[in-house]
Amino acid sequence: MFDVIKKDLEVLEEELLQAVSSEEELVNEVGTHLVTSGGKRLRPALCLLSARGGKEFDLKRTLPLAVALELIHTASLVHDDVIDSSDTRRGEPTANAKWGNQVAILSGDYIFARAFSLIAAAGYSNRVSVRLAELVCNLSVGEIIQDNAVYQASRGYEDYFCRIQKKTADFLEICCDLGAEVGGLTPEEGAKLAEYGHCIGMAFQITDDLLDILQTEETMGKPAGNDIRQGIVTLPVIRALEVSPESEVLRHIVTDPEMSAEDVERALKIVKATDGIDKAKEKADEYLERAKAVLPDTLPQEVKEAYIMVADFIGDRDY
Amino acid sequence: MFDVIKKDLEVLEEELLQAVSSEEELVNEVGTHLVTSGGKRLRPALCLLSARGGKEFDLKRTLPLAVALELIHTASLVHDDVIDSSDTRRGEPTANAKWGNQVAILSGDYIFARAFSLIAAAGYSNRVSVRLAELVCNLSVGEIIQDNAVYQASRGYEDYFCRIQKKTADFLEICCDLGAEVGGLTPEEGAKLAEYGHCIGMAFQITDDLLDILQTEETMGKPAGNDIRQGIVTLPVIRALEVSPESEVLRHIVTDPEMSAEDVERALKIVKATDGIDKAKEKADEYLERAKAVLPDTLPQEVKEAYIMVADFIGDRDY
């Protein structure tokens, strides 16, 4: 998918390993495990693509930013896994499962700090460091709010879109925005790429939430309905609460922290019987269309094509 | 003690509250609790004193750094309390006790990121941001190592001094060093203040470790010998392992993760019967003498006096 930045991404892998390497064996081992266990590298890829849109593209200058973006994502997942007591991620044991919460919490802190250290050493503009620090603030605040407001069916569309923006779309927007800045694109081009990032981020999260409802245990490696179980109300559920004849049953289930596996099954059935799934797919498609439409004409053709492929890929994820 | 920066510290309190304020009520509440529950403000005080040593002192310019230093300290304590499952700190309930691990971990991340956000927005030199990011890296790595090597009596003097440097002295050194830079002191003056910070940091931690052995449950609010119980070997214990006739008994106790309360009592008795306490006090005093001797003569008199008082205060902490 990323032919134009295939070689950049290979160098990125080496730099990621380098960034978490340490003289201390345990720290090295944890860091290596974390940056090598899967990950689509979507954030650095967006950053590199944006930077490649400019005439001044310089891989060496862009890499610290691309690496820092992936490190921030990684550190945030490490702390999420401690919070959720998750045992596996992408088929690999989590840091907390392998080394305990202590090591996992501190490794997350270490990786966050490594990201800020790379950014500081690279000497980018203040805007780059400020936006990255604010991103981490917002990711944390967003999650505190989400975790504090689970099992509340009253949360409507506005709340949902606001939540997924903080959780996913802002991050992808920043990858495109800062990549464009470091690549020397004009502010107008940067603003358009930032909007592209926002739109594919919204579509990505809507799709992710859909997968949680539609996929089977075999394909996902975990039972469907995980969001419902954790008290997180997503787009199809909000729609079903609005239109389903069994709306009250659904409301009762999704607000009950003690719901049984049968309750989750029943809730999924109620949601699937409505147009909630189709409406969510439509919304994701709307965002993807807008993403493609907003791409500046001034981008090199191969970068623009890669960006369109990213959008299409998000739309085509297996339901 | 800090007359010369008394007003600066009052403004600092307001800025600290401002720094963690948030539109989200829960985030605001946690942040306020964390920055208002005690704390000696030693780190920002050292930073402000150093900056006041220069002719260019500008409170407004120094405050973001002073605030960021206290925030980094706070965030690191929040995560420590989660790791140690501590219920109270400085007589107040910890964030994990009050709001759970989830909120505590994320609030720690938020506060770390707020610190980096302040530093980025202030537009200091790259050196300032790089050193702060590296400080957080080293604090995390230092703690991973310490937590991974508990109940090992074989760790000698060199290991101990290396550990307390990473845990405490490097932090106080950076406060003085960066305060001097932002205050416009010469690099020579900055290097001397950095050494001062290193020395009082070493003395501070040695004294802290001594208090853990010497204080009684009534004065400390927790039973003495906490370090021994957690498998952490400090200076008097290392000395006792070397010279005590009961060295083997002591070694057996401090390497046993299942030690009983009676074992801890016995270990404390063995340590107190040696010259380990006196040797540790001597070492702390050596560091404090060196700290005072290294202070540059070019400092304004009231700053120099305040720095001497800080050193004397550390030496006079109640045993």
Image: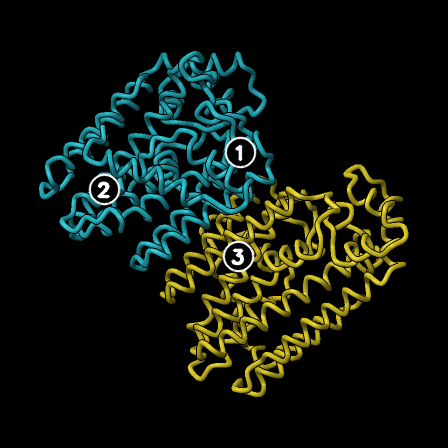
Chain colours: A yellow, B cyan
Q: Nearer the viewer, residue A141 or B314?
A: A141
Which is more N-terminal, label 2 or label 1?
1
Circle 2 or circle 3, nearest the eye: 3
Please determine if labels 1 and 3 lie on a single subunit: no
Residue holding disc 2: B195
Q: Residues within 10 Å of mark 1 (few under 14, many from 20)?
A: many
What residue sits 57% from the left and 88% below the top? A301
Question: In which image quadrant can residue A58 be found?
Answer: bottom left
Chain of the residue that carries numbered disc 1 in the rendered image: B
Distance of label 2 from label 3 (alpha carbons):
33 Å
Q: Amino acid at mark 1?
A: Ala
Evaluate whether residue B311 shows in this view. yes
Q: Which mark is residue B63?
A: none
Residue A236 in the image: state x and y as whole percent. 79, 58
Q: Nearer the viewer, residue B74 or B315?
A: B74
Q: Residues within 10 Å of mark 3 (few under 14, many from 20)?
A: many
Q: Amino acid at mark 3?
A: Ile
Vertical relation: A200 (above or below) A271: below
Chain of the residue that carries numbered disc 2 in the rendered image: B
Circle 1 or circle 2, nearest the eye: 1
Please determine if labels 1 and 2 lie on a single subunit: yes
Please determine if labels 2 and 3 lie on a single subunit: no
* Quarter of the figure that contains the N terminus of chain B: top left
Chain of the residue that carries numbered disc 3 in the rendered image: A
Q: Which mark is residue B95?
A: 1
Distance of label 1 from label 2 (alpha carbons):
34 Å
Residue holding disc 3: A72
